[in-house]
Amino acid sequence: MTGADQTPRATPRRPPRKRPDAAARRQAILDAALAVFAEKGFAGARMEDVARRAGTAKGTLYLHFKDKAALFEGLVRTAADPVLGMMEAQVAQFPGSTRDLLVLLFARLHGEIICTPRRHIVRLLIGEGERFPELADFYFRTVVARGQDLLRAINARALARGEITSDAALRFPQLIIGPFLTAVIWIDLFERSEPLDAEAMLAAHIDVVLRGLGWRDEGVGA
Amino acid sequence: MTGADQTPRATPRRPPRKRPDAAARRQAILDAALAVFAEKGFAGARMEDVARRAGTAKGTLYLHFKDKAALFEGLVRTAADPVLGMMEAQVAQFPGSTRDLLVLLFARLHGEIICTPRRHIVRLLIGEGERFPELADFYFRTVVARGQDLLRAINARALARGEITSDAALRFPQLIIGPFLTAVIWIDLFERSEPLDAEAMLAAHIDVVLRGLGWRDEGVGA
DNA sequence: GAATTATGACTGACCGGTCAGTTTTTTCAA
DNA sequence: TTGAAAAAACTGACCGGTCAGTCATAATTC
Protein backbone atom coordinates (compact mmCIF):
# COMPACT_ATOMS: atom_id res chain seq x y z
CA MET A 1 0.00 0.00 0.00
CA THR A 2 0.98 3.67 0.21
CA GLY A 3 3.95 3.65 2.53
CA ALA A 4 3.98 7.43 3.09
CA ASP A 5 1.04 7.99 5.45
CA GLN A 6 1.13 4.77 7.43
CA THR A 7 -0.23 5.43 10.90
CA PRO A 8 1.37 3.62 13.85
CA ARG A 9 -0.49 0.77 15.45
CA ALA A 10 -1.10 2.79 18.62
CA THR A 11 -4.72 3.56 17.75
CA PRO A 12 -6.49 0.32 16.84
CA ARG A 13 -9.72 2.12 15.99
CA ARG A 14 -8.16 3.94 13.10
CA PRO A 15 -7.85 1.97 9.87
CA PRO A 16 -5.07 3.68 7.93
CA ARG A 17 -6.28 2.42 4.59
CA LYS A 18 -7.83 4.83 2.21
CA ARG A 19 -11.16 3.80 0.75
CA PRO A 20 -10.75 2.22 -2.65
CA ASP A 21 -12.97 3.76 -5.29
CA ALA A 22 -16.19 2.08 -6.29
CA ALA A 23 -14.89 0.34 -9.42
CA ALA A 24 -11.91 -1.16 -7.62
CA ARG A 25 -14.05 -2.41 -4.80
CA ARG A 26 -16.55 -3.88 -7.20
CA GLN A 27 -13.75 -5.72 -8.93
CA ALA A 28 -12.39 -6.97 -5.62
CA ILE A 29 -15.82 -8.35 -4.81
CA LEU A 30 -16.05 -10.06 -8.19
CA ASP A 31 -12.60 -11.61 -7.77
CA ALA A 32 -13.54 -12.88 -4.35
CA ALA A 33 -16.86 -14.16 -5.64
CA LEU A 34 -15.16 -16.12 -8.42
CA ALA A 35 -12.92 -17.83 -5.90
CA VAL A 36 -15.69 -18.64 -3.45
CA PHE A 37 -18.30 -19.70 -6.01
CA ALA A 38 -15.70 -21.85 -7.75
CA GLU A 39 -14.86 -23.62 -4.53
CA LYS A 40 -18.33 -24.02 -3.05
CA GLY A 41 -20.83 -23.83 -5.89
CA PHE A 42 -23.65 -21.30 -6.01
CA ALA A 43 -25.74 -22.63 -3.16
CA GLY A 44 -22.73 -23.49 -1.03
CA ALA A 45 -20.99 -20.14 -1.34
CA ARG A 46 -21.50 -17.93 1.71
CA MET A 47 -21.85 -14.24 1.15
CA GLU A 48 -19.86 -13.65 4.29
CA ASP A 49 -16.94 -15.57 2.82
CA VAL A 50 -17.09 -13.50 -0.33
CA ALA A 51 -17.07 -10.37 1.80
CA ARG A 52 -14.17 -11.48 3.96
CA ARG A 53 -12.10 -12.45 0.94
CA ALA A 54 -12.88 -9.13 -0.72
CA GLY A 55 -11.81 -7.30 2.44
CA THR A 56 -15.23 -5.79 3.11
CA ALA A 57 -18.18 -6.39 5.37
CA LYS A 58 -21.14 -8.41 4.20
CA GLY A 59 -23.40 -5.41 3.96
CA THR A 60 -21.08 -3.79 1.45
CA LEU A 61 -21.74 -6.55 -1.05
CA TYR A 62 -25.34 -5.44 -1.18
CA LEU A 63 -24.35 -1.91 -2.08
CA HIS A 64 -22.88 -3.28 -5.31
CA PHE A 65 -25.14 -6.24 -6.10
CA LYS A 66 -28.83 -6.65 -5.41
CA ASP A 67 -28.48 -10.22 -4.17
CA LYS A 68 -26.51 -13.40 -4.56
CA ALA A 69 -27.88 -14.14 -8.02
CA ALA A 70 -26.98 -10.67 -9.26
CA LEU A 71 -23.46 -11.17 -7.99
CA PHE A 72 -23.20 -14.42 -9.91
CA GLU A 73 -24.57 -12.76 -13.01
CA GLY A 74 -22.01 -9.99 -12.72
CA LEU A 75 -19.35 -12.63 -12.43
CA VAL A 76 -20.37 -14.38 -15.61
CA ARG A 77 -20.65 -11.16 -17.52
CA THR A 78 -17.28 -9.71 -16.59
CA ALA A 79 -15.44 -12.99 -17.05
CA ALA A 80 -16.80 -14.01 -20.42
CA ASP A 81 -17.25 -10.74 -22.22
CA PRO A 82 -13.62 -9.70 -22.82
CA VAL A 83 -12.52 -13.14 -23.99
CA LEU A 84 -15.36 -13.41 -26.49
CA GLY A 85 -14.84 -9.87 -27.71
CA MET A 86 -11.18 -10.53 -28.37
CA MET A 87 -11.98 -13.68 -30.29
CA GLU A 88 -14.63 -12.01 -32.42
CA ALA A 89 -12.18 -9.30 -33.36
CA GLN A 90 -9.54 -11.84 -34.30
CA VAL A 91 -11.86 -13.92 -36.45
CA ALA A 92 -13.17 -10.87 -38.26
CA GLN A 93 -9.80 -9.95 -39.72
CA PHE A 94 -7.73 -13.12 -39.67
CA PRO A 95 -5.73 -13.47 -42.87
CA GLY A 96 -4.36 -17.02 -42.63
CA SER A 97 -5.72 -20.51 -43.11
CA THR A 98 -8.66 -21.80 -41.13
CA ARG A 99 -6.39 -24.35 -39.52
CA ASP A 100 -4.17 -21.60 -38.18
CA LEU A 101 -7.24 -19.71 -37.03
CA LEU A 102 -8.53 -22.70 -35.08
CA VAL A 103 -5.11 -23.30 -33.56
CA LEU A 104 -5.04 -19.70 -32.44
CA LEU A 105 -8.56 -19.76 -31.00
CA PHE A 106 -8.05 -22.96 -29.07
CA ALA A 107 -4.77 -21.60 -27.76
CA ARG A 108 -6.74 -18.60 -26.49
CA LEU A 109 -9.39 -20.84 -24.92
CA HIS A 110 -6.65 -22.82 -23.28
CA GLY A 111 -4.70 -19.85 -22.00
CA GLU A 112 -7.60 -17.62 -21.01
CA ILE A 113 -10.07 -20.14 -19.63
CA ILE A 114 -8.75 -23.65 -19.03
CA CYS A 115 -5.62 -22.35 -17.30
CA THR A 116 -7.39 -19.68 -15.23
CA PRO A 117 -10.07 -19.70 -12.54
CA ARG A 118 -12.48 -18.63 -15.26
CA ARG A 119 -12.93 -22.25 -16.19
CA HIS A 120 -14.85 -22.72 -12.95
CA ILE A 121 -17.57 -20.44 -14.24
CA VAL A 122 -18.26 -22.80 -17.08
CA ARG A 123 -18.61 -25.73 -14.73
CA LEU A 124 -20.66 -23.69 -12.28
CA LEU A 125 -23.08 -22.69 -14.98
CA ILE A 126 -23.50 -26.30 -16.01
CA GLY A 127 -24.27 -27.39 -12.48
CA GLU A 128 -26.54 -24.56 -11.43
CA GLY A 129 -28.04 -23.47 -14.73
CA GLU A 130 -31.17 -25.56 -14.60
CA ARG A 131 -32.11 -24.27 -11.18
CA PHE A 132 -31.81 -20.66 -12.35
CA PRO A 133 -33.46 -20.56 -15.75
CA GLU A 134 -33.06 -16.83 -16.11
CA LEU A 135 -29.35 -17.27 -15.47
CA ALA A 136 -29.11 -20.00 -18.11
CA ASP A 137 -30.97 -17.76 -20.55
CA PHE A 138 -28.68 -14.88 -19.77
CA TYR A 139 -25.64 -17.08 -20.28
CA PHE A 140 -27.03 -18.40 -23.52
CA ARG A 141 -27.54 -14.93 -24.93
CA THR A 142 -24.29 -13.49 -23.57
CA VAL A 143 -21.89 -16.33 -24.25
CA VAL A 144 -23.27 -19.39 -26.01
CA ALA A 145 -25.10 -17.68 -28.86
CA ARG A 146 -22.10 -15.47 -29.56
CA GLY A 147 -19.79 -18.45 -29.47
CA GLN A 148 -21.98 -20.32 -31.90
CA ASP A 149 -22.06 -17.40 -34.29
CA LEU A 150 -18.29 -17.27 -34.11
CA LEU A 151 -17.92 -20.96 -34.91
CA ARG A 152 -20.42 -20.75 -37.74
CA ALA A 153 -18.54 -17.80 -39.19
CA ILE A 154 -15.32 -19.79 -39.12
CA ASN A 155 -16.94 -22.76 -40.77
CA ALA A 156 -18.60 -20.65 -43.46
CA ARG A 157 -15.24 -19.01 -44.13
CA ALA A 158 -13.54 -22.40 -44.47
CA LEU A 159 -16.22 -23.63 -46.86
CA ALA A 160 -15.97 -20.46 -48.92
CA ARG A 161 -12.20 -20.80 -49.18
CA GLY A 162 -12.59 -24.41 -50.26
CA GLU A 163 -10.61 -25.67 -47.27
CA ILE A 164 -13.28 -28.11 -46.18
CA THR A 165 -16.24 -29.77 -47.86
CA SER A 166 -18.61 -30.77 -45.05
CA ASP A 167 -21.14 -28.42 -43.52
CA ALA A 168 -21.56 -30.59 -40.39
CA ALA A 169 -19.92 -27.99 -38.17
CA LEU A 170 -22.17 -25.32 -39.60
CA ARG A 171 -25.20 -27.33 -38.57
CA PHE A 172 -23.68 -28.41 -35.25
CA PRO A 173 -21.07 -25.97 -33.92
CA GLN A 174 -21.25 -28.08 -30.75
CA LEU A 175 -19.01 -30.60 -32.49
CA ILE A 176 -16.19 -28.06 -32.51
CA ILE A 177 -16.55 -26.90 -28.93
CA GLY A 178 -17.38 -30.25 -27.32
CA PRO A 179 -13.83 -31.36 -26.46
CA PHE A 180 -13.11 -27.95 -24.96
CA LEU A 181 -16.03 -28.43 -22.57
CA THR A 182 -14.83 -31.91 -21.82
CA ALA A 183 -11.39 -30.58 -20.98
CA VAL A 184 -12.77 -27.95 -18.61
CA ILE A 185 -14.81 -30.55 -16.78
CA TRP A 186 -12.00 -33.07 -16.71
CA ILE A 187 -9.48 -30.67 -15.21
CA ASP A 188 -11.82 -29.71 -12.40
CA LEU A 189 -13.08 -33.19 -11.60
CA PHE A 190 -10.62 -35.85 -12.60
CA GLU A 191 -7.23 -34.21 -12.85
CA ARG A 192 -6.21 -35.90 -9.61
CA SER A 193 -7.34 -39.32 -10.81
CA GLU A 194 -5.84 -39.06 -14.28
CA PRO A 195 -4.07 -35.93 -15.52
CA LEU A 196 -5.07 -34.64 -18.94
CA ASP A 197 -2.81 -32.77 -21.32
CA ALA A 198 -5.52 -30.43 -22.51
CA GLU A 199 -3.28 -28.66 -25.01
CA ALA A 200 -2.33 -31.92 -26.73
CA MET A 201 -5.93 -33.08 -26.69
CA LEU A 202 -7.16 -29.90 -28.33
CA ALA A 203 -4.41 -30.13 -30.94
CA ALA A 204 -5.50 -33.69 -31.73
CA HIS A 205 -9.09 -32.48 -31.88
CA ILE A 206 -8.26 -29.86 -34.49
CA ASP A 207 -6.50 -32.46 -36.61
CA VAL A 208 -9.32 -34.96 -36.37
CA VAL A 209 -12.17 -32.55 -36.91
CA LEU A 210 -10.61 -30.75 -39.85
CA ARG A 211 -9.77 -34.00 -41.57
CA GLY A 212 -13.27 -35.20 -40.73
CA LEU A 213 -14.76 -32.14 -42.40
CA GLY A 214 -12.82 -32.85 -45.59
CA TRP A 215 -9.73 -30.72 -45.12
CA ARG A 216 -7.60 -29.83 -48.13
CA ASP A 217 -4.34 -28.12 -47.35
CA GLU A 218 -4.46 -25.29 -49.83
CA GLY A 219 -8.15 -24.91 -50.45
CA VAL A 220 -9.81 -25.33 -53.80
CA GLY A 221 -8.73 -22.08 -55.35
CA ALA A 222 -5.09 -21.94 -54.27
CA MET B 1 -32.50 -68.70 7.10
CA THR B 2 -32.12 -72.44 6.50
CA GLY B 3 -34.97 -73.70 4.39
CA ALA B 4 -35.44 -76.87 6.49
CA ASP B 5 -36.71 -75.18 9.59
CA GLN B 6 -39.61 -73.14 8.28
CA THR B 7 -41.60 -71.45 10.97
CA PRO B 8 -44.15 -74.03 12.15
CA ARG B 9 -47.16 -71.78 12.73
CA ALA B 10 -46.84 -69.44 9.78
CA THR B 11 -49.00 -69.99 6.73
CA PRO B 12 -46.85 -71.50 3.98
CA ARG B 13 -48.01 -68.91 1.47
CA ARG B 14 -46.68 -65.46 2.25
CA PRO B 15 -49.58 -63.14 2.83
CA PRO B 16 -49.15 -59.90 0.89
CA ARG B 17 -47.11 -57.73 3.16
CA LYS B 18 -48.37 -54.36 3.99
CA ARG B 19 -44.85 -53.01 4.20
CA PRO B 20 -42.90 -53.17 0.98
CA ASP B 21 -39.73 -55.20 1.40
CA ALA B 22 -36.43 -53.51 1.96
CA ALA B 23 -35.19 -53.72 -1.62
CA ALA B 24 -38.36 -52.22 -3.08
CA ARG B 25 -38.37 -49.41 -0.58
CA ARG B 26 -34.72 -48.71 -1.25
CA GLN B 27 -35.47 -48.50 -4.96
CA ALA B 28 -38.41 -46.19 -4.34
CA ILE B 29 -36.13 -43.89 -2.38
CA LEU B 30 -33.54 -43.92 -5.16
CA ASP B 31 -36.16 -43.10 -7.78
CA ALA B 32 -37.44 -40.25 -5.69
CA ALA B 33 -33.91 -39.03 -5.04
CA LEU B 34 -33.13 -38.94 -8.75
CA ALA B 35 -36.15 -36.76 -9.40
CA VAL B 36 -35.47 -34.37 -6.54
CA PHE B 37 -31.70 -34.08 -7.02
CA ALA B 38 -32.22 -33.55 -10.74
CA GLU B 39 -34.63 -30.72 -10.11
CA LYS B 40 -32.88 -28.98 -7.22
CA GLY B 41 -29.22 -29.93 -7.32
CA PHE B 42 -27.41 -31.56 -4.43
CA ALA B 43 -27.46 -28.67 -1.98
CA GLY B 44 -30.96 -27.61 -2.96
CA ALA B 45 -32.57 -31.01 -2.63
CA ARG B 46 -34.49 -31.43 0.62
CA MET B 47 -34.45 -34.81 2.26
CA GLU B 48 -38.05 -34.32 3.25
CA ASP B 49 -39.02 -33.92 -0.41
CA VAL B 50 -37.22 -37.14 -1.28
CA ALA B 51 -39.09 -38.87 1.53
CA ARG B 52 -42.49 -37.54 0.55
CA ARG B 53 -41.97 -38.51 -3.09
CA ALA B 54 -40.83 -41.98 -2.05
CA GLY B 55 -43.93 -42.33 0.12
CA THR B 56 -42.01 -42.60 3.38
CA ALA B 57 -41.15 -40.43 6.32
CA LYS B 58 -37.86 -38.61 6.49
CA GLY B 59 -36.48 -40.85 9.20
CA THR B 60 -36.91 -43.89 6.99
CA LEU B 61 -34.37 -42.51 4.55
CA TYR B 62 -31.75 -42.78 7.24
CA LEU B 63 -32.50 -46.47 7.74
CA HIS B 64 -31.28 -47.05 4.17
CA PHE B 65 -28.62 -44.38 3.67
CA LYS B 66 -26.22 -42.96 6.21
CA ASP B 67 -26.68 -39.37 5.06
CA LYS B 68 -27.41 -37.20 2.06
CA ALA B 69 -24.06 -37.84 0.42
CA ALA B 70 -24.50 -41.60 0.72
CA LEU B 71 -27.89 -41.30 -0.95
CA PHE B 72 -26.35 -39.40 -3.82
CA GLU B 73 -23.63 -41.99 -4.15
CA GLY B 74 -26.18 -44.78 -4.24
CA LEU B 75 -27.98 -42.87 -6.95
CA VAL B 76 -24.91 -42.59 -9.14
CA ARG B 77 -24.03 -46.22 -8.65
CA THR B 78 -27.42 -47.71 -9.47
CA ALA B 79 -28.03 -45.41 -12.44
CA ALA B 80 -24.73 -45.84 -14.24
CA ASP B 81 -23.85 -49.43 -13.57
CA PRO B 82 -26.43 -51.27 -15.70
CA VAL B 83 -25.95 -49.02 -18.73
CA LEU B 84 -22.19 -49.44 -18.69
CA GLY B 85 -22.45 -53.18 -18.11
CA MET B 86 -24.72 -53.56 -21.10
CA MET B 87 -22.37 -51.61 -23.30
CA GLU B 88 -19.33 -53.56 -22.22
CA ALA B 89 -21.09 -56.80 -23.05
CA GLN B 90 -22.08 -55.50 -26.46
CA VAL B 91 -18.61 -54.29 -27.36
CA ALA B 92 -17.01 -57.55 -26.23
CA GLN B 93 -18.85 -59.64 -28.82
CA PHE B 94 -19.91 -57.25 -31.54
CA PRO B 95 -19.37 -58.80 -34.96
CA GLY B 96 -19.95 -55.89 -37.33
CA SER B 97 -18.00 -52.84 -38.43
CA THR B 98 -16.75 -50.24 -35.97
CA ARG B 99 -19.04 -47.71 -37.57
CA ASP B 100 -22.05 -49.87 -36.82
CA LEU B 101 -20.75 -50.39 -33.29
CA LEU B 102 -20.44 -46.66 -32.69
CA VAL B 103 -23.88 -46.05 -34.13
CA LEU B 104 -25.28 -48.66 -31.78
CA LEU B 105 -23.48 -47.28 -28.72
CA PHE B 106 -24.49 -43.70 -29.34
CA ALA B 107 -28.05 -44.86 -29.89
CA ARG B 108 -27.86 -46.48 -26.47
CA LEU B 109 -26.41 -43.35 -24.90
CA HIS B 110 -29.19 -41.36 -26.51
CA GLY B 111 -31.98 -43.71 -25.51
CA GLU B 112 -30.77 -44.63 -22.04
CA ILE B 113 -29.31 -41.36 -20.85
CA ILE B 114 -30.07 -38.30 -22.93
CA CYS B 115 -33.76 -39.15 -23.16
CA THR B 116 -34.17 -40.21 -19.51
CA PRO B 117 -33.78 -38.46 -16.16
CA ARG B 118 -30.43 -40.20 -15.89
CA ARG B 119 -28.88 -37.42 -17.89
CA HIS B 120 -29.38 -35.16 -14.89
CA ILE B 121 -26.90 -37.24 -12.93
CA VAL B 122 -24.18 -36.40 -15.39
CA ARG B 123 -24.87 -32.71 -15.09
CA LEU B 124 -25.22 -32.96 -11.32
CA LEU B 125 -21.85 -34.64 -11.04
CA ILE B 126 -20.24 -31.91 -13.09
CA GLY B 127 -21.67 -29.20 -10.92
CA GLU B 128 -21.12 -30.75 -7.51
CA GLY B 129 -18.11 -32.96 -8.14
CA GLU B 130 -15.44 -30.52 -7.07
CA ARG B 131 -17.13 -29.93 -3.74
CA PHE B 132 -17.21 -33.65 -3.00
CA PRO B 133 -13.83 -34.98 -4.06
CA GLU B 134 -14.53 -38.46 -2.81
CA LEU B 135 -17.69 -38.47 -4.92
CA ALA B 136 -15.76 -37.36 -7.98
CA ASP B 137 -13.17 -40.07 -7.34
CA PHE B 138 -15.90 -42.64 -6.91
CA TYR B 139 -17.54 -41.53 -10.15
CA PHE B 140 -14.24 -41.63 -11.95
CA ARG B 141 -13.57 -45.21 -10.89
CA THR B 142 -17.15 -46.40 -11.37
CA VAL B 143 -18.06 -44.70 -14.62
CA VAL B 144 -15.39 -42.61 -16.30
CA ALA B 145 -12.51 -45.09 -16.17
CA ARG B 146 -14.76 -47.89 -17.41
CA GLY B 147 -16.07 -45.69 -20.20
CA GLN B 148 -12.56 -44.82 -21.25
CA ASP B 149 -11.52 -48.44 -21.32
CA LEU B 150 -14.54 -49.14 -23.48
CA LEU B 151 -13.68 -46.40 -25.95
CA ARG B 152 -10.04 -47.46 -26.06
CA ALA B 153 -11.10 -51.03 -26.77
CA ILE B 154 -13.26 -49.85 -29.64
CA ASN B 155 -10.47 -47.78 -31.09
CA ALA B 156 -7.92 -50.56 -30.74
CA ARG B 157 -10.35 -52.90 -32.47
CA ALA B 158 -10.85 -50.46 -35.34
CA LEU B 159 -7.09 -50.03 -35.76
CA ALA B 160 -6.58 -53.78 -35.70
CA ARG B 161 -9.25 -54.28 -38.34
CA GLY B 162 -7.64 -51.62 -40.51
CA GLU B 163 -10.78 -49.48 -40.45
CA ILE B 164 -8.98 -46.37 -39.25
CA THR B 165 -5.39 -45.17 -39.26
CA SER B 166 -5.14 -42.57 -36.49
CA ASP B 167 -4.56 -43.43 -32.86
CA ALA B 168 -5.81 -40.00 -31.67
CA ALA B 169 -8.90 -41.51 -30.05
CA LEU B 170 -6.76 -44.07 -28.30
CA ARG B 171 -4.72 -41.30 -26.72
CA PHE B 172 -7.75 -39.08 -26.09
CA PRO B 173 -11.00 -41.03 -25.72
CA GLN B 174 -12.45 -37.70 -24.61
CA LEU B 175 -12.64 -36.73 -28.29
CA ILE B 176 -15.23 -39.44 -28.85
CA ILE B 177 -17.38 -38.72 -25.84
CA GLY B 178 -17.16 -34.90 -25.88
CA PRO B 179 -20.19 -34.19 -28.06
CA PHE B 180 -22.29 -36.56 -25.97
CA LEU B 181 -21.46 -34.51 -22.89
CA THR B 182 -22.21 -31.35 -24.81
CA ALA B 183 -25.60 -32.73 -25.79
CA VAL B 184 -26.49 -33.64 -22.20
CA ILE B 185 -25.61 -30.17 -21.02
CA TRP B 186 -27.34 -28.46 -23.91
CA ILE B 187 -30.62 -30.29 -23.41
CA ASP B 188 -30.77 -29.37 -19.75
CA LEU B 189 -29.68 -25.77 -20.09
CA PHE B 190 -30.43 -24.37 -23.50
CA GLU B 191 -33.17 -26.50 -25.00
CA ARG B 192 -35.65 -23.69 -24.41
CA SER B 193 -33.42 -21.11 -26.03
CA GLU B 194 -32.45 -23.23 -29.02
CA PRO B 195 -33.61 -26.82 -29.43
CA LEU B 196 -30.96 -29.38 -30.34
CA ASP B 197 -31.56 -32.52 -32.37
CA ALA B 198 -29.16 -34.62 -30.32
CA GLU B 199 -29.63 -37.71 -32.44
CA ALA B 200 -28.70 -35.89 -35.63
CA MET B 201 -25.78 -34.21 -33.92
CA LEU B 202 -24.38 -37.51 -32.69
CA ALA B 203 -24.82 -39.03 -36.15
CA ALA B 204 -22.86 -36.13 -37.64
CA HIS B 205 -20.26 -36.60 -34.94
CA ILE B 206 -19.74 -40.25 -35.86
CA ASP B 207 -19.30 -39.31 -39.50
CA VAL B 208 -16.84 -36.53 -38.79
CA VAL B 209 -14.79 -38.35 -36.22
CA LEU B 210 -14.47 -41.58 -38.18
CA ARG B 211 -13.44 -39.70 -41.31
CA GLY B 212 -11.09 -37.67 -39.17
CA LEU B 213 -9.47 -40.84 -37.86
CA GLY B 214 -8.86 -42.07 -41.40
CA TRP B 215 -11.88 -44.24 -42.00
CA ARG B 216 -11.79 -46.83 -44.80
CA ASP B 217 -15.11 -48.48 -45.53
CA GLU B 218 -14.01 -52.09 -45.65
CA GLY B 219 -10.88 -52.07 -43.59
CA VAL B 220 -7.46 -53.02 -44.89
CA GLY B 221 -7.91 -56.75 -44.86
CA ALA B 222 -11.44 -57.06 -46.28
C1' DG C 1 -45.00 -59.64 23.43
C1' DA C 2 -40.57 -59.09 21.48
C1' DA C 3 -38.34 -57.52 17.51
C1' DT C 4 -38.33 -54.94 13.59
C1' DT C 5 -39.56 -51.10 10.94
C1' DA C 6 -41.49 -46.57 10.42
C1' DT C 7 -42.76 -41.99 11.88
C1' DG C 8 -42.56 -36.88 12.21
C1' DA C 9 -41.91 -33.33 15.74
C1' DC C 10 -37.96 -31.42 17.27
C1' DT C 11 -33.18 -29.41 17.63
C1' DG C 12 -29.19 -27.08 16.63
C1' DA C 13 -26.57 -25.07 13.19
C1' DC C 14 -26.50 -22.28 9.32
C1' DC C 15 -27.02 -18.34 6.19
C1' DG C 16 -29.19 -14.61 3.05
C1' DG C 17 -30.44 -10.27 3.61
C1' DT C 18 -31.43 -5.95 6.65
C1' DC C 19 -30.62 -1.81 9.00
C1' DA C 20 -29.34 1.16 12.82
C1' DG C 21 -25.26 2.95 13.80
C1' DT C 22 -20.26 4.33 12.60
C1' DT C 23 -16.62 6.18 9.74
C1' DT C 24 -14.96 8.61 5.75
C1' DT C 25 -15.49 11.99 2.18
C1' DT C 26 -17.45 16.03 0.24
C1' DT C 27 -19.43 20.41 0.45
C1' DC C 28 -19.56 25.10 1.52
C1' DA C 29 -20.08 29.15 4.56
C1' DA C 30 -17.33 31.98 7.26
C1' DT D 1 -8.05 27.93 5.04
C1' DT D 2 -11.04 25.98 8.26
C1' DG D 3 -14.31 23.37 10.45
C1' DA D 4 -18.79 21.87 10.81
C1' DA D 5 -22.53 19.67 8.87
C1' DA D 6 -24.44 16.83 5.20
C1' DA D 7 -23.83 12.97 2.21
C1' DA D 8 -21.95 8.74 1.09
C1' DA D 9 -19.78 4.51 2.16
C1' DC D 10 -19.27 0.97 5.20
C1' DT D 11 -20.07 -2.21 9.09
C1' DG D 12 -21.58 -6.38 11.57
C1' DA D 13 -25.05 -7.89 14.94
C1' DC D 14 -29.29 -9.54 14.22
C1' DC D 15 -33.63 -11.65 12.30
C1' DG D 16 -36.43 -14.86 10.03
C1' DG D 17 -36.42 -18.85 7.72
C1' DT D 18 -34.47 -23.29 6.31
C1' DC D 19 -33.08 -27.98 6.76
C1' DA D 20 -30.03 -32.26 7.89
C1' DG D 21 -30.16 -35.40 11.06
C1' DT D 22 -32.13 -37.41 15.73
C1' DC D 23 -35.01 -39.97 18.72
C1' DA D 24 -38.98 -41.04 21.56
C1' DT D 25 -42.94 -43.17 20.21
C1' DA D 26 -46.03 -45.92 17.31
C1' DA D 27 -47.19 -49.46 14.01
C1' DT D 28 -46.41 -53.83 12.08
C1' DT D 29 -44.62 -58.38 11.90
C1' DC D 30 -43.54 -62.86 13.63
Image (spheres, coloured by chain):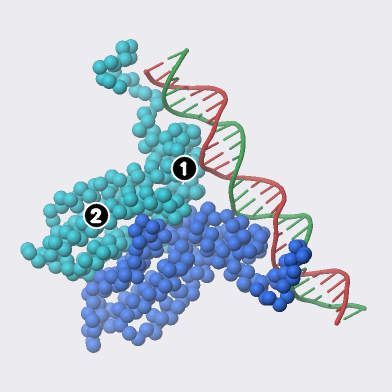
Chain colours: A blue, B cyan, C green, D red
Q: Name the residue under label 1.
A: B68
B5 lies left or right of A180: left
Q: Do the residues labelled 1 and 2 touch (CB within 8 Å)?
A: no
Q: Residue at x 36, y 33 (%)?
A: B24
Q: Name the residue under label 2.
A: B150
- Chain name for mark 1: B
B97 lies left or right of A110: left
Amino acid type, callout 2 = Leu
- On whether disc 1 and disc 2 are found on a single subunit, the reply is yes
- Hey, which quadrant is residue A187 in on the image? bottom left
Q: Find the distance from the CA under tag 1 to the CA under tag 2.
A: 31 Å
Amino acid type, callout 1 = Lys
Q: Which residue is drawn at 19% across and 52% down?
A: B91
- Chain name for mark 2: B
Q: Residue at x 52, y 70 (%)?
A: A78
- Quick one: label 2, few (<14), some, or many (20+) residues within 10 Å? some
